[in-house]
Amino acid sequence: MKKTLLALMLAGASTTAFADAWLYGGVSAGSADYNGNSDTPLGFHVGTGILPIIGIEGGYWKHGSYDLTGGHVEMGSWYGALKPSIDIGPIQLWAKGGFHYFEGSYKGGLSSRNDADGTDIMYGLGADYFVTDLLSIGASWQRFSGVKTISSDKELDSFSFNATIHIF
């Protein structure tokens, strides 16, 4: 009985996994924390499923503006990541991991400094609920590592809500 139940659960999960979209794109907004400061990040993402349970995703995050001694820094990241996922009914659980290219522009009393930039790893976890076959809404946490400014070299964490359109 236990083996039959397990087989049915795995078959159901794999059937919904094959229903993943070939192409998707969406937007995100939430709250980010860097160096003890918070702001509202905004982002967009596009991706494709290369196998039923793994995809490739890329996008941009405007992390926000964060106070530093003598001014502030406005930050953003371009990223590319692998995104494994599993569908359980209308819910998709996912993780992602990859690299991001960070850019920081100093403002205020720091505007004479050269802009900050660099490349490091990023990763995250999330869940999406399929409202329809074409639209999902969800929540996620993402960490962008190695964000370097004049005052620190830290991780930038963001918690966000997202809406995604799934095509094909």
Image (spheres, rainbow, N blue to C red):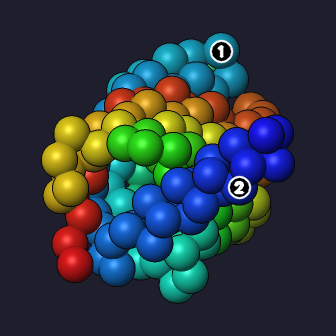
Location of the N terminus (image quadrant):
top right
- 3 vs 68, nearest the viewer: 3
Q: How crowded is mark 2: few (under 14 residues within 10 Å), some or many (20 or more)?
A: few
Q: What residue does disc 2 label?
A: 7
Identify the secondary structure beneath mark 2: helix
Label 1, on which residue?
A: 36
Q: Residue 150: image x %, image y %?
A: 71, 40
At which x and y percent is residue 114? 57, 58
- Asked if one can make out residue 51 in the rendered structure from this viewpoint, the answer is yes
- Quadrant in which residue 2 is drawn: top right
Quarter of the image with the C terminus is bottom left
The CA span between labels 1 and 2 is 48 Å
- Residue 35: which quarter of the image? top right
Q: Which amino acid does label 1 sit on?
A: Gly
Q: Front-most of 64 and 93?
A: 93
**Badge 1 or badge 2: first in the primary sequence:** 2
